[in-house]
Image (spheres, helix red, strand yellow):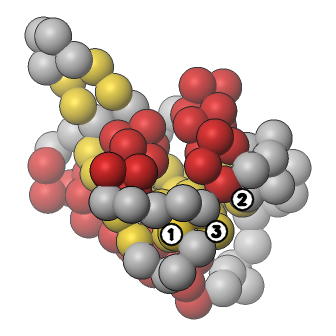
Amino acid sequence: MTTPSDGLDPEDRKIITLARSARARNGVPEGAAVRDGTGRTYVAGTVGLDSLRLSALRTAVAMAVASGATSLEAAAVVSGEGAVSDEDRAAVRDLGGPETPVLLAAPDGTVRLTVTAG
């Protein structure tokens, strides 16, 4: 685990911005974005249907898989929560591997922490 830093890579800042936008646009508790091995991004919000409940990060990973992604470089989730759930990290790990960074940002975009999917 690393601590927050303002010296974020521009590509990581981009996925945080996309995740914030999804959260705000859809009025959902979480927004997430992932970047695949080719640099494409996939953005999602929390899914809260009666018959289907998915976190924003698991939804973004599912969108990447459904679009043909075979790897992930990084993931970001914007949430009021203080941690990334084990289930979310597992979804990232399944596609990106255990060393894939997962950034957790507050609703204002401030990075709270970075963990690996591991």
Tag 1 and tag 2, C-beta contact below 8 Å = no
- Name the residue nearer the viewer: 19 or 65: 65
Q: Dot 2: within a 10 Å radius of its alpha carbon, few (fewer than 14), some, or many (20 or more) residues?
A: many
Which of pointers 1 and 2 indicates the residue nearer the eye?
A: 1
Q: Residue furthest top?
A: 50
What is the distance, in whole Å, between disc 3 and disc 1 at their CAs?
6 Å
- Name the residue nearer the viewer: 40 or 77: 40
The amino acid at mark 1 is Arg
Q: Earlier in the sequence, mark 2 or mark 3?
A: 3
Q: Dot 3: within a 10 Å radius of its alpha carbon, few (fewer than 14), some, or many (20 or more) residues?
A: many
User: Residue tagged by mark 2?
Assistant: 101
The amino acid at mark 2 is Pro
- The residue at the point 52 percent across, 81 percent down is 38
Q: Residue furthest bottom?
A: 10
Q: Earlier in the sequence, mark 1 or mark 2?
A: 1
The amino acid at mark 3 is Glu
User: Residue tagged by mark 3?
Assistant: 73
Residue 30 in view, yes or no: no
Residue 75 in view, yes or no: yes
* 99 lies above or below 110: above
Q: Earlier in the sequence, mark 3 or mark 1?
A: 1
User: Residue tagged by mark 1?
Assistant: 35
Q: Dot 1: within a 10 Å radius of its alpha carbon, few (fewer than 14), some, or many (20 or more) residues?
A: many
